[in-house]
């Protein structure tokens, strides 16, 4: 089962209106969907949002100011309900994590986890990740990028909507510092194969494994992933490094 991370699983008719026709459509990292927020998520949004949700601005982010320190920054594109983000941030306290998500319940859920666990190294931007990448992330400024369980767009005619495409990966590479990494994970094998082909063809990246990578220690198993593994479903991690 895919987490509601990069692209939120919606029928095609639920996309925002006013976009250009499909053949002219720019890359977007999400599809909007409605979602109800629990009382705890609403309270977290009200109480913690002002401190941990950064406003989108079409100018480079001053990460040291945003996090109150200088540390490596990892960008996570589409964090779903934030469980993995919180777990990774807790396990890697010397790294700062910038999560980008448009799904309100997910933002509220991660804020709730931030409050419960006292996580000082997480900030959130509630905006399209492609625009955040293009305008808020300075070239060569990221220590890493996480893209976990993006929408696989199962139908062949929709494959072009997948986020991991050559142009987008090339843009990601410009934001990675030399030695920085790109970590993708998916539970849809055809998408895993496409990811491997796309990342392997990018000259600015090198594969840290001979093919798919073992799951890095910092990426926790989600409840959906555990359930899928019990049913015999596979999960594929890809970890590439900026040369």
Image: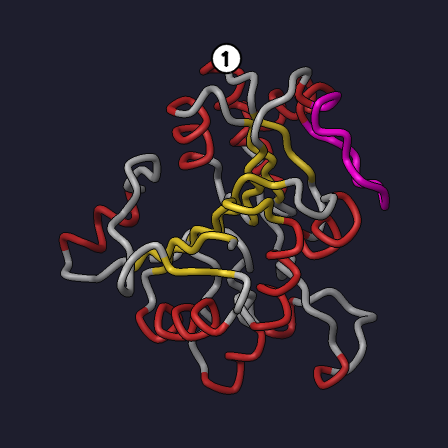
Give left or right: position of 174 versus 192: right
Q: How is the image coloured?
A: secondary structure
Quadrant, the N terminus: bottom left
Disc 1: which residue: 118
| Residue plotted at (47% across, 59% down) | 150
- Marks counted in the figure total 1
Give left or right: position of 60 versus 176: right
- For disc 1, the neighbor class at 10 Å (few under 14, some 14 to 19, many from 20) is few
Question: Residue 202: horizontal and vertical position, in percent?
Answer: 52, 69
Question: Residue 232: horizontal and vertical position, in percent?
Answer: 14, 61
Q: What span is in magenta?
A: 53-66
| Residue plotted at (62% across, 27% down) | 42
**Relative to the observer, which residue lies in front, 95 or 17?**
95
Q: Is residue 56 magenta?
A: yes
**Relative to the observer, which residue lies in front, 207 or 102?**
207
Question: Residue 233: horizontal and vertical position, in percent?
Answer: 20, 62
Give left or right: position of 239 versus 157: left
| Residue plotted at (56% across, 27% down) | 96
| Residue plotted at (34% across, 39% down) | 219
Where is residue 69, by image quadrant?
top right
Q: Is residue 112 magenta?
A: no
Question: The residue tagged with tag 1: helix, strand or loop?
Answer: loop
Q: Is residue 68 above or below residue 29?
A: above
**Relative to the observer, which residue lies in front, 104 or 73?**
73
On the question of residue 4 being in view, the answer is no
Question: Residue 68: horizontal and vertical position, in percent?
Answer: 68, 16
On the question of residue 18 being in view, the answer is yes
Q: Is residue 1 above or below residue 90?
A: below
**Relative to the observer, which residue lies in front, 189 or 40?**
189
């Amino acid at each position: 089962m895919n987490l509601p991370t990069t692209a939120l699983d919606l029928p095609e008719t639920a996309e925002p209106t006013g976009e250009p026709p499909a053949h002219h459509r720019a890359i977007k990292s999400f599809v909007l969907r409605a979602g109800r927020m629990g009382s705890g998520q609403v309270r977290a949004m009200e109480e913690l949002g002002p401190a941990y949700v950064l406003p989108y601005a079409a100018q480079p982010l001053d990460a040291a100011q945003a996090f109150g320190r200088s540390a490596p920054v990892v960008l996570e594109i589409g964090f779903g309900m934030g469980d993995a983000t919180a777990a990774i941030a807790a396990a890697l306290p010397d790294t700062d994590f910038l999560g980008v998500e448009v799904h309100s319940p997910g933002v509220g859920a991660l804020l709730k986890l931030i409050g419960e666990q006292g996580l000082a190294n997480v900030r959130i931007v509630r905006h399209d990740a492609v625009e955040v990448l293009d305008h808020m992330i300075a070239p060569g400024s990221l220590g890493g990028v996480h893209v976990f369980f993006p929408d696989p767009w199962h139908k062949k005619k929709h494959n072009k909507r997948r986020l991991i495409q050559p142009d987008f990966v090339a843009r990601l590479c410009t934001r990675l510092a030399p030695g920085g990494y790109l970590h993708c994970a998916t539970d849809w094998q055809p998408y895993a194969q496409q990811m491997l082909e796309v990342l392997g063809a990018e000259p600015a990246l090198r594969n840290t494994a001979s093919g798919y990578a073992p799951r890095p220690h910092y990426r926790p198993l989600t409840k959906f992933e555990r359930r899928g593994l019990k049913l015999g479903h596979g999960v594929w991690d890809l970890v590439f490094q900026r040369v």
